[in-house]
């Protein structure tokens, strides 16, 4: 069974989706994006500028892929839509 970590899940579920990759990922190469971004905010330091830059970099690849494939995504949605 695949577990999903959506934003509309309940609070304990969100904690589980954050905590499990943190426990399993012992080295930094196996961290998820959420774990890597959380390292910029600690009780001692507050690196918001680095956090925002890392968030933009993590989204950039997906955004570029969407912009490149936007024509085919829109065509697929139009073809699979309900015909009137």
Image (cartoon, rainbow, N blue to C red):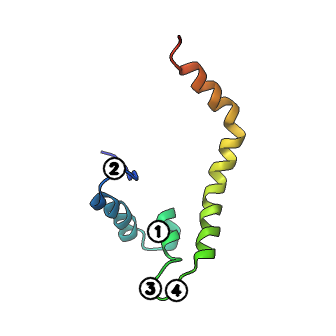
How far is the residue under mark 2 from the one under mark 1? 17 Å
39 lies left or right of 68: left
Q: Residues within 10 Å of mark 4 (few under 14, many from 20)?
A: few
Nearer to us: label 1 or label 4: 4
Q: Residues within 10 Å of mark 1 (few under 14, many from 20)?
A: some
Front residue of 21 and 17: 17
Labels 3 and 1 touching (C-beta < 8 A)? no
The residue sitting at the front extreme is: 84
Q: Eyeballing the image, is 42 above or below 65?
A: below
Residue that numbered label 2 is attached to: 3
Residue that numbered label 4 is attached to: 45
Which disc number belongs to residue 25?
none
Residue that numbered label 3 is attached to: 43
Q: Position of residue 81 (x, y in %)?
A: 53, 20
Q: Residue at x 53, y 12 (%)?
A: 83
Q: Earlier in the sequence, mark 2 or mark 1?
A: 2
Which disc number belongs to residue 35?
1
How far is the residue under mark 3 from the one under mark 4? 6 Å
Q: Residue at x 48, y 89 (%)?
A: 44
Q: Residues within 10 Å of mark 2 (few under 14, many from 20)?
A: few
Label 1 residue SS: helix
Q: Residue at x 50, y 76 (%)?
A: 39
Nearer to us: label 3 or label 1: 3
Q: Position of residue 68 (x, y in %)?
A: 72, 40
Splitting the image into 4 quarters, where does residue 49 fall? bottom right
Splitting the image into 4 quarters, where does residue 10 fall? bottom left
């Amino acid at each position: 069974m695949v577990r999903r970590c959506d934003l509309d899940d309940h609070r304990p579920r969100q904690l589980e989706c954050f905590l499990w990759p943190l426990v399993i990922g012992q080295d930094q190469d196996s961290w998820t994006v959420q774990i890597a971004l959380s390292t910029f905010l600690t009780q001692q330091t507050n690196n918001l500028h680095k956090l925002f830059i890392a968030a933009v970099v993590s989204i950039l690849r997906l955004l570029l892929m969407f912009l490149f494939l936007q024509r085919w995504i829109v065509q697929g949605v139009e073809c699979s839509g309900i015909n009137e």
